[in-house]
Image: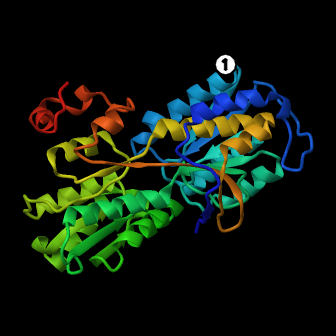
Amino acid sequence: MRTRTREATVAVSVSALALSLAACGSLLGSDDDGNKTERKGDAVTVGLLLPEAETARYEKFDHPIIEKQVKKLTNGKGKLVYANADEDAAKQSDQLGQMVTDKVDVILVSAVDAKKIAPAVKKAKEANIPVIAYDRLAEGPVSGYVAFDNELVGQVQGQAILRALGGGNRKKSKIVMINGSPTDPNAAVFKEGALSQLRNQVDIAKSYDTDGWKPQTAAAHMTEAITAIGKDNIAAVYSANDGMAGGAIKALKAAGLTDLPPVTGQDAELSAVQRVVTGEQYMSVYKPYPEEAVGAAQMAVRIAQGRMVEFDALAGDKSENATTKNIPSLLVSVRPMTRDTIKSTVIEDGIYKTKEICTSEFKAACATVGLKG
């Protein structure tokens, strides 16, 4: 379980922070005890381990943005070594071990399984290679953590359900919760954030943890819930991410529902944005991936170079995993994305162009929400 102490405002732009750090040149190279640390130049190697490709964001945003930023931060002299685990925890441990053997300078890892990666993280620590947990808080002696404010993600989703249900007596409203993978520590934080809003406010009739975040498993959970509760008795569906929301919606439609209950999501995937436009999905949580990825690249390069004042300035929050406390952390804020906020989130930030969302199939629906492209 993760706890945190807020020591800085996470909404500060990491790019603006980088500019302010440029004035700290005379202070660079000190560790927390004020001792000199080994300073490296720009020719550093950053390892990046991502968990799977099922979720579109990893290959579309995280990998290319981090790679570009590593080059930018090192004047083109740094290198990114990348591997994807394809949802295989053992494979990811081997990948991390290989990076240790290859003597990379720092490793960013988004863990398939937070517990199973811990021994590999320990070996990296013993080899004096810092490991930064990225997007998911790995166990073991990690040196840093970069992620979205996951508790806030769940809170935003829970608030959206309450808003969709409106006022009045909501305690009899039956809610189905389709939570994320039990091996992903973020899933538990999302769930707890949502429950902090929904507990004692609605009737959580069914709740499922979904191995691997798989949409087809979510669809099976939804079908089971429909059978147990009745398709017309489901007031809303809490889905922890967009892929599973798509699976849940598919099951609801297969059961013959045309007037769908509000369904939440997370990640603002293109297909989910289109479902929000048509009204099939009520909302998604927009997570500014560029900000998270840029922050991760900055932290990785700075710790690899031994520039600890800059590293600590970026990591103004503190987190803890099952084995390590006071982990320097950068927690990035999130925003709800509904039909009313598509323009101010994914379009304004350049995640998608209007024409990507409003293909021929969605032109009419786009027009109803003021999107034209």
| Residue lying furthest top | 76
Q: Is residue 74 above or below residue 330?
A: above
- 278 with respect to 238 (left or right): left
Q: Position of residue 97 (x, y in %)?
A: 70, 48
Q: Is residue 130 above or below residue 216?
A: above
How many numbered marks, from 0 up? 1
- 8 with respect to 226 (left or right): right
Q: Name which residue type carries label 1.
A: Gly
Q: Position of residue 324 (x, y in %)?
A: 72, 63
Q: Position of residue 175 (x, y in %)?
A: 25, 72
Tell me what residue is drawn at x 10 percent, y 72 percent.
232
The answer to whether residue 276 of the structure is visible from this angle is: yes
The answer to whether residue 105 of the structure is visible from this angle is: no
Residue 358 lies in what quarter of the image? top left
Q: Which residue is mark 1?
A: 76
- 74 with respect to 6 (left or right): right
Tell me what residue is drawn at x 39 percent, y 41 percent.
56
Residue 12 lies in what quarter of the image? top right
User: Depth check: 335 or 2 in front?
Assistant: 335
Q: Is residue 257 above or below residue 43?
A: below
The quadrant the N terminus occupies is bottom right
Q: Position of residue 373 (x, y in %)?
A: 20, 24
Q: Secondary structure at mark 1?
A: loop
Counting other residues with Cα less than 10 Å from the Cα at mark 1, is it few (<14), some (14-19), or many (20 or more)? Answer: few
Tell me what residue is drawn at x 73 percent, y 35 percent.
302
